Amino acid sequence: MKLRDAVPADFERLAVGLPPQGLKLPETGLVTVTTAMLIARRCEDLRAAQGWGTCLITEGDLMVGFVVSKLPDPAGHAEFGYAVSPAQRGRGIAGAAVGAFIERALDEGLVALLAETDPGNAGSIRVLERNLFTPVPSPRPERLRWRRYLRR
């Protein structure tokens, strides 16, 4: 598993059912057209503001998922999310990708990462717990919120 910096064109291609340049998709349906276009815009904004923040999760020449962050707040805290192709779940890819993204966030000088999950998403909850995220109060009662302070 590797993280590859994404460019807006990667998600624009996904929006029309094509894989990012140089990659294959394990199956269709990893991301909806609307979501792909929203991520393409966020990717463009993040690259312009800080040069990083959106990554493709790859295994060889397969794109198996992605990680996307928001811009950090003034305290150095950034919210992020991730998705892994349904056919690739249960193999530790999400956990490894979150771990690699934590290292990237540390290298970029962030203080903390935040994530939200659905209360019923046991797999995502395990990924965050294994990566040392702890529950924190959520502004949205229908979601669980997690935080990890970053230190080496």
Image: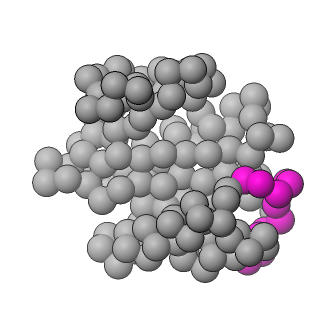
Q: Is residue 102 left or right of residue 65?
A: left
Q: Nearer the viewer, residue 103 or 8?
A: 8
- Residue at the image point whose x is 67% and y is 51% from the top: 65
Per the picture, the main secondary structure of the magenta-coloured stretch is: loop
- Residue 79, placed above or below residue 140: below
Q: Position of residue 103 (x, y in %)?
A: 43, 45
Is 28 inside the magenta-drawn segment?
A: yes
- Residue at the image point whose x is 20% and y is 53% from the top: 73
Q: Position of residue 68 (x, y in %)?
A: 48, 55
For the record, the magenta segment spans 19-30
- Residue 30, placed above or below residue 9: above
Is residue 127 visible in the rendered image? The answer is no
Is residue 129 visible in the rendered image? The answer is yes
- Residue 54, placed above or below residue 124: below
Q: Position of residue 64 (x, y in %)?
A: 73, 51
Q: Is residue 95 left or right of residue 16?
A: left
